[in-house]
Structure formats: C-alpha cells, structure tokens
C-alpha cells in the first residue's frame, strides 16, 4: 500500500510555476492574486497566510483584502472592483461568508477570466460544456494527483462520494473529460458500499470524518481523500478511515499532506495562467 505524497507533487508543480513566472515578470507582468476575506475567522486567516507564504516563494503577489464581517453589498462591490482591476489576475473569496450570503451569489461577481478557484457558476457551466474555464483547485487536484501517479483513467470505474459544486461535481466533470466512467454518490444514495466497492478509483469528498472504511473499498483500489475534518484534539482527519483501508487498497492520499498541498499549488498555477492570458 502506498501513501501518495501530496507535498512532493506540490513541490514539482510549484517549481514549474516559478519557472513560468520569471518570463512574465521580465516582460513587466507580476502575477497577482487577490484574496478577499469577508469575516474574522482564525482558520481562514491561517489558510490565507499559508497561501501567501507559498506564493511568495514563486514570486506571485498576494493582495489580501480584509473586510471584517462585510455586508453582502460591501463584499460584492469589492469583488466587482477587483474584477475590473487590470493589476489583479486571480480572485478568490474565502469562506465562511457573512450571514445570508451564498457562494453562488458571491461567485457571480468574480470575472470568469480571474475566477482561479472556479467559484462563478458560469465557470462550472463552461466546465460542463467542455469549454475553457478554471475548475475549483481542489477538484483539479484530484485529477492532477491521479495523472502524476500514472493512474490510467480512460475506461476506469471512478466513484465520487459528494456532489458539492466545489469538489464533487467539478471533479466528476474533470474525470469524465479523461474518459473515466464516473458514478456520483451522495447522502441519499442507498447502500453506499455497494457502489463504492465497484470503484477502481474512489474519491471521498463528503465532509464527514472517517466515514468510509474497509467495507467501502475494492481490493487494490486507489483512494483520493479530499476531506479535512477537525477533531476535538485539534488534528485533521479525512473522510476515509486510512488505517482501516490500508490493508485493502493499493494507494491512498493522507490527511494532511495529500490533496491540500496540491490544491494550493494548482491555485497558484491558475493565477499564472490567468496572468499569461
């Protein structure tokens, strides 16, 4: 059984990103990511600092906009202004959002060309239609990891557990684009294990700590665990009970150190792609 090293994959991606930034900067373009933080949340603040540190290593500028419990109008006005700012190439809006504000509502105010984390519903629509668009970086990370691990996807049976617009649906669309045969399961799926045990590749993106165990996996399957669930002692665990599935599967991404680092690297790669466009 192999623990897939997301940090090593992230490092390789970031090395390529850094190489791509150099000619852009030499030509007078500094890739710039605007991160809008609409509420005061320590976990969000930690994540933003982490992105900024990684971006600095690749010479990508991060512009952090703290709005401190913004109203819906204040938040959407800021996103509209950033969308019109020629000096900004990528925009993300962090969660949690202010009370009464939805992610779809916010995403509509991020220009598609700068929507480097696929928040605008138009981006998901373009993805579904096979048109150029940025997918959510976490969904991208699922496919990137499988490709870098040289997992053949064409004709492969893949089960995605989770149907969110942030991970489940876009991951399924990206896998379909690789000619995988994709099944989406969710909270209303009857006898979940019957479906997941058919998967050559199982993608867990349901947001429930250690929900999937040995009874849910096919012998030799590859498991991509997208979950990041905090425990009472301050640790993070995935949607998969890693210890339980280890004797059964051929490979699994750990939490932390699996999908997360790859997500950050791909977010920054999208910023550079937007700056180059």
Image (tube, grey):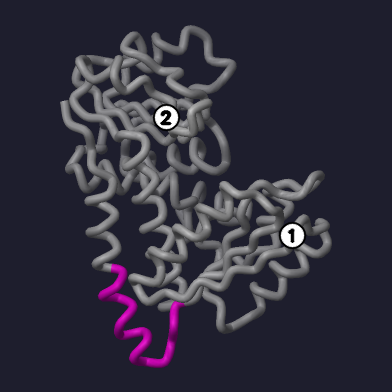
Q: Is residue 120 above or below residue 31?
A: above
Of residues 17 and 45, which is closer to you in this image?
A: 45
Place of residue 80 in the rendered image (x, y in percent of width and height, measured from the top left): 72, 70
Looking at the rendering, in which quadrant would you find the C terminus? bottom left
Kindly identify which residue carries mark 2.
Answer: 237
Is residue 206 among what the camera can see?
A: no
Which of the labelled discs sits on residue 68, or is there none?
Answer: 1
User: Up-down: is 263 above or below 198?
Assistant: below
Marks 1 & 2, CB-CB < 8 Å contact: no
Residue drawn at 49 percent across, 33 percent down: 234
Q: Which quarter of the figure is the N terminus placed in?
A: top left
Q: CA distance from mark 1 to mark 2?
A: 29 Å
In the rendered image, residue 21 lying in the magenta stretch gets the answer yes
Question: Where is residue 79 drawn, in percent x and y?
Answer: 69, 67
Q: Which residues are magenta?
A: 17-31
Residue shown at 34% from the left, 30% from the top: 181
104 with respect to 48 (left or right): right
């Amino acid at each position: 059984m192999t623990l897939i090293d997301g940090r090593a994959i992230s490092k390789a991606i970031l090395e390529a990103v850094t190489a791509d930034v150099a000619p852009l900067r030499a030509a007078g373009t500094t890739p710039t990511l605007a991160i809008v933080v609409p509420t005061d949340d320590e976990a969000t603040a930690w994540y933003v600092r982490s992105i900024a540190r990684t971006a600095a290593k690749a010479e990508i500028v991060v512009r952090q906009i703290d709005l401190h419990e913004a109203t819906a109008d204040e938040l959407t006005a800021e996103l509209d202004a950033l969308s019109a700012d020629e000096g900004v190439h990528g925009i993300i809006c962090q969660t949690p959002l202010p009370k009464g504000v939805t992610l779809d509502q916010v995403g509509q105010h991020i220009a598609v060309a700068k929507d480097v984390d696929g928040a605008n519903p138009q981006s998901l629509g373009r993805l579904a239609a096979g048109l150029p668009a940025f997918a959510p970086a976490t969904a991208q990370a699922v496919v990137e990891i499988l490709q870098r691990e040289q997992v053949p996807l064409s004709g492969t049976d893949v089960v995605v557990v989770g149907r969110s617009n942030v991970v489940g649906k876009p991951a399924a669309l990206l896998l379909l684009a690789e000619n995988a045969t994709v099944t989406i399961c969710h909270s209303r799926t009857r006898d979940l294990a019957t479906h997941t045990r058919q998967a050559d590749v199982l993608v867990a993106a349901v947001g429930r700590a250690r929900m999937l165990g040995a009874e849910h996996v096919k012998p030799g399957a590859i498991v991509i665990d997208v979950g990041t669930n905090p425990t009472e002692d301050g640790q993070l665990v995935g949607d998969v009970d890693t210890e339980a599935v280890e004797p059964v599967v051929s490979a699994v991404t750990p939490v932390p150190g699996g999908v997360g680092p790859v997500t950050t690297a791909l977010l920054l790669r999208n910023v550079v792609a937007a700056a180059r466009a």
